[in-house]
Image (spheres, rainbow, N blue to C red):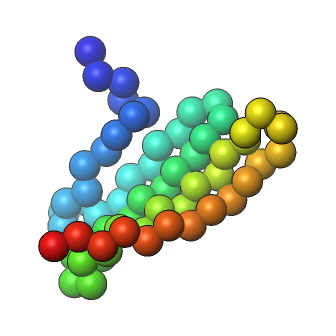
Amino acid sequence: MDDPFSSCTLTPAQPTCVIETAVHRGTFRADFTAKQVIEVSRYAPRTDRWVNEQHIYSFQ
């Protein structure tokens, strides 16, 4: 059985999704016109301090 928190599929009909666990929250938004996915993550590494990051991925 697949872990429901490990992945999501972005489509033009559903361009956003959230993956959330006890130590990580990732929000993903696809812009199909610009051909980019924007990820905003908040996670707690072993230091127990929350870290925020943003990543932008391009696709063809």
Horizontally, is 54 left or right of 32 in the view? right
Q: Nearer the viewer, residue 25 or 60?
A: 60
Q: Quadrant of residue 35?
A: bottom left
In the figure, is residue 29 to the left or right of 53? left
Residue 26 position within the rendered picture, expressed as x and y whole percent measured from the top left: 52, 51
Residue displayed at 77% across by 48% down: 50
Q: How many marks?
A: 0
Task: State the image coordinates of residue 14 (x, y, percent, origin top left).
Answer: 25, 59
Above or below, 37 relative to 14: below
Name the residue: 62% across, 62% down: 53
Is the N terminus in the top left, top right, bottom left or bottom right quadrant? top left
Residue furthest bottom in the image: 34
Quadrant of the drawing holding the C terminus: bottom left
* Outermost residue toward the top in this view: 1
Q: Is residue 17 left or right of residue 60?
A: right
Is 2 situated above or below 45? above
The residue at 29%/64% (across/down) is 15
Q: Is residue 2 left or right of residue 43?
A: left
Q: Is residue 37 above or below residue 41?
A: below
The residue nearer to you, when weighing 7 against 56, is 56
Q: Position of residue 11 (x, y in %)?
A: 19, 60
